[in-house]
Image (cartoon, rainbow, N blue to C red):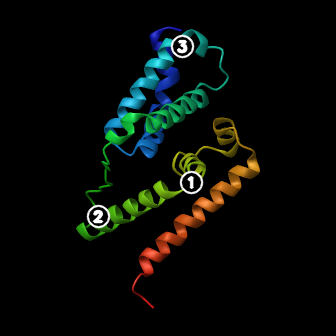
Amino acid sequence: MKQAEFLNVVMPFKDRMYRLAKRLLVSSEEAEDATQEILLKLWSKNKAIEGYNNVEAFAMTMTKNFCLDRLKSKQAGNLKLVHSNYTDENVSLQHQVEARDSISWVERIMEELPEQQKMVLQLRDVEQYDYDEIEKLLDMKPTAIRVALSRARKTVREKLMQKHSYGIG
């Protein structure tokens, strides 16, 4: 596989790899490093890639495994907690603050979820993968995916409701 072919295959899902890495590693810098590492690993396997039916699924699985290994390593203690915030120039300052606060709360809640629920929620609701793709990526049965997703959504919803109704009653 030549470089141009490789780029045509890999670039369409590079952002998804980054977002998955950022969800797992939290730090933008760490996620960028992880994405670059995975791209290098994919390039080193470029001959074998031609034989894969779904290169994106393979790359996402590599990203997930790399990030989880990174978190388990000794370097995990050095990871920075750096969040990038959502901004929109057309929204009032009040709405910007509220949007940042809500996104921040959802991110915090997602971080507290069990690993499997966090992965399923990220892949389904953030990355918009369909159930078949998630099944292959995480090696889970469809029923288990739906249960994990339902539980994750319920936890996020309940914790957000607690946060927003705090002090009202």
Label 1 environment density (alpha carbons within 10 Å; few <14, some 14–19, many ≥20): few
Which image quadrant for residue 34?
top left
Pick whichever, 140 or 74, lies toward us: 74
The amino acid at mark 1 is Pro
Q: What residue appears at the point 26 percent right and 70 percent down from the top-left corner?
A: 94
Secondary-structure class at tag 1: loop
Which image quadrant for residue 167?
bottom left
Of the image marks 1 and 3, the number of the one nearer the N terminus: 3
Distance of mark 1 from mark 3, alpha carbons? 32 Å
| Mark 1 lies on residue | 114
Q: Is residue 104 left or right of residue 115?
A: left
Q: Tell me if residue 70 comes above or below residue 109 in the rendering.
A: above
| Mark 3 lies on residue | 45
How many labels, in total? Answer: 3
Q: Tell me if residue 4 comes above or below residue 155 in the rendering.
A: above
Q: What residue appears at the point 75 percent right and 44 percent down from the top-left corner?
A: 141
Q: Position of residue 39 (x, y in %)?
A: 45, 22
| Mark 2 lies on residue | 96
